[in-house]
Image (spheres, grey):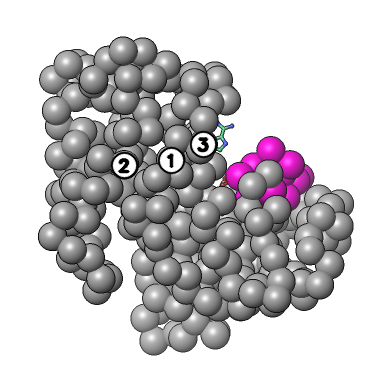
Amino acid sequence: GVCLGIAFGHRSSGPKNDRFAGNFKTVIISKCKAYLGLNEEQSSENTCEKVWDAFSGAYVGRDPCDVPMEAYDSLIHAVNPKAACNRMLFWSQTKDIVHQFTEAKKCLLTLEDTLLGFIMDNLTWCSKNGSKETFSTGCPGWSECEKNPVRSFWNRVSAAFAESACGEVTVMLNGSVDTPFRANSIFASIEVKKFSSPKMRALNVILVTRGNDTANCENDSLQNLQAVLDPTLKYTCTEVHRSKIMDCISDPDKPCGACW
Ligand code: AVW
């Protein structure tokens, strides 16, 4: 099932749209079942069918540049994920390392380790005005139009994930770029705005560095982050060399607490 998902995840190649359409549902259902099988989460016989119905209902038959994030409201309500207090890991410009990390250590989890994030990660989809089909090629790119089905999905699930944030929250940011806290990232434009105390207590930034690096915890963009953050939240920032995290990932005996 998971392999099938990966096989259909590429945008540039793949079968023609009309042959793909029926398979996209199969990909979603099989990734959904694979996730539920691996994660002891309470679910019923028809959970994955409900996910498909709510998911496809958001964009099927609609113009691929006119799917607002609210279209996925009923999907969020259908799944209603439970928050993992003190274990939530946000990220921006650090996708590869965070997912290697959560794969190796179970102490923290990202949006892509939750049901909806897991199912849709690396997939592209859209429909057309008046169509009943799902296509996975010829869909608008991320920035081609704002209200495309993929971008609106990630905006909506990210908002829900951040809204549920509780206790101590971690974010891994990239210290090898000029602007680790990028204004039009999902983390800055959606997630940070949803963080609120007292449910959430603290935001702990892990700034991943690589020696002679461009950014440190004093970076201007991180000053902006502190300025826009709910002032009653505690804020910390720790610079951690990438190799220290990589060592931790490759050593199963190293507990999470030893990674930074
Ligand atoms: P990111 P975010 N063009 O690393 O904070 C194409 O900046 O946004 O992290 N694809 C894009 C673009 C773009 N301009 N911008 C974003 N993407 C896609 C959910 C692309 O697939 C989690 F909870 C890229 O790899 C994190 O805390 C991905 O979005 C947060 O949102 C991430 O861009 C990460 O989003």
Query: Do callouts 1 and 2 mark residues in contact (Cβ within 8 Å)?
Result: yes
Q: Residues within 10 Å of mark 2 (few under 14, many from 20)?
A: many
Where does the magenta region start and end? Answer: 177-188
Residue wearing tag 3 = 69
SS type, badge 2:
helix
Q: Say if the magenta span includes residue 231.
A: no
Image position of 84 (left or right of 230): left
As rendered, which of 123 and 25 lies closer to the eye? 25
Q: Where is residue 67 shown, x and y percent of the image?
A: 47, 26
Residue wearing tag 1 = 72
Query: Do callouts 3 and 1 mark residues in contact (Cβ within 8 Å)?
Result: yes
Residue 54 has which mark? 2
SS type, badge 3:
helix
Q: Is residue 178 visible?
A: yes
As rendered, which of 66 and 86 lies closer to the eye? 66
Q: Where is residue 120 shown, x and y percent of the image?
A: 34, 44
Looking at the picture, which amino acid does disc 3 mark? Met
Q: Quadrant of residue 202?
A: bottom right
Q: How many marks do you count on the picture? A: 3
Q: Residues within 10 Å of mark 3 (few under 14, many from 20)?
A: many
Q: Quadrant of residue 56?
A: top left
Quadrant of the picture in which ligand 1 is shown: top right
